[in-house]
Amino acid sequence: MTRRALAVLLALAALPASAQVERSDGPAWCRLPVSTWAAPSAAARVARPVAPDCDPATEGVRFEVSYTGFPPEAEGAFQAAVDTWACRVRSDQVVRVSATWEPLAATTLGSAGPFLYRNFGAAPTRDVWYPAALADALSGRDLGDGEADIEALFNSDFDDWHLGPGPPPPDLYDLYTVVLHELGHGLGLIGSLEVEGGLGFVGREPEGAFTYDLHTQTPAGVSLLDSDVFPDGSAALASALQAEVRFVGRAVEQVAGRSVALYAPPRWVQGGSYSHLDEETFAAGTPDGLMTPFIARGETVAEPGKVVCAMIADVGWTLAGRCAEQVGELPAVEPRVVATRRGPNPTTGRTTVTLTSQEPVSVRVALVDVLGRRVADFGRIVLVSGRTEDVVIDGGALASGVYVLTVLGGPEPVTLPLAVVR
Ligand SMILES: [Zn+2]
């Protein structure tokens, strides 16, 4: 339980009007580097699937890929990875991918990532960015009106690709596996937190947290978005990101029994740290090794695996096919924010309100007077399921009267009246 000091602002501004839908200017990127990891044994090198194992239009999701510059064999490998994901998540909206085969830096195999939306009508959490394909799925319509949801670039200058359908030799990188990995980011396995100059930051481009960030925490269970503990732009956040970081959610807990380790080396790796699973825990050749920051020559991962499927569910997707089978039925939980008064009402001094939520949610908490003027702003509070957050209100600093604590950002606004007497 954390205690939150009162920051009385004399701001007279009313609460902001409902926000507009926003689209990010560009995608959030993962760049998968050429690595020096040793190839797994021949037995661990497998062939890719030959065809979709469902009807994407009715059981999964239809992808439309616009290919630029791909030789036919490379396009075949890319399309096979698309066909796998097309039967692992469910949406009635088309996922549009822009894929380009072009010269990239010699150390890069490929890059990909999602465009993002926030504050669309169906967004589960206000002010949080969702990958475009998921935002469309939740909205039941194409928010981008035909624009790409995912952008992917692959290195045409690279000589060591394995493009064919069979298992790769030990000295080549399997394009199918690399694309399957990059599309995992494109569907939402990417966070906004980063370290620069010894300081940790929450979402700078675009500004603000991603849905993935609602699920990351320290081993002690403190959300990395808890701005009391980890202020944006602080050394404390940088330290946490370069220590042990874990991903938690209902689906991950169901398949793994607990949270799972993310890649968090002691020195920040841009594009590698935080948005990948830990390389040592989920090593090459293990069934959950798809979303680690490195791929070895000869490494193949034919399926997302149950941990990755669970993470995809926790960021907001409805699973399909083998992912749905591996994760299993999740108990239905209504995302509900509850505010409970713990102190006296009316109050002459301090009183405490406890906030809980069944689902991770980022809320904005403020105290307003009867004219709707904000008299105190508690900022953004991340509620993690199973934990409580206390908001401490110092009635002694307020004039006599009736106030309302407002909690915005959950499925519906929560309000709690409070009276202050002298
Ligand atoms: Zn990656």
Image: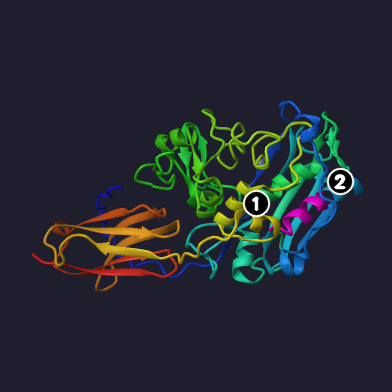
Q: Which residue is mark 1?
A: 27
Vertical side of 167 occupied by 406: above or below: below
Could you say where residue 369 lies in the image, as x and y percent from the top left?
24, 69
In the rendered image, is residue 286 in sight? yes
State which tag comes first along the sequence, 1 or 2: 1
Which class describes the residues within 10 Å of circle 2: few (<14), some (14-19), or many (20+)?
A: many
| Cβ atoms under marks 1 and 2 closer than 8 Å | no
The answer to whether any part of residue 69 appears in the image is no
Q: Which residue is mark 2?
A: 74
According to the image, what is the colour scheme of the structure?
Answer: rainbow
Q: Is residue 83 magenta?
A: yes
Q: Is residue 251 left or right of residue 37?
A: left
Q: Residue at x 13, y 58 (%)?
A: 349
> In the displayed structure, does residue 229 sit left or right of residue 186?
left
Q: Position of residue 258 (x, y in %)?
A: 49, 45
Q: Which segment did they paint magenta?
A: 78-88
- The total of numbered circles placed on residues is 2
On the picture, is 222 further left or further right than 3?
right
x, y percent for residue 384:
41, 53
Is most of the magenta stretch helix, strand or loop? helix
Label 1, secondary structure: give it.
loop
The C terminus lies in which quarter of the figure? bottom left
Q: Is mark 2 within 8 Å of ligand 1?
A: no
Tell me how far mark 1 sits from mark 2, CA to CA.
Answer: 23 Å
Identify the residue at horizontal 66%, vertical 39% (top origin): 289
- State yes or no: residue 59 in magenta: no
Q: Secondary structure at mark 2?
A: helix
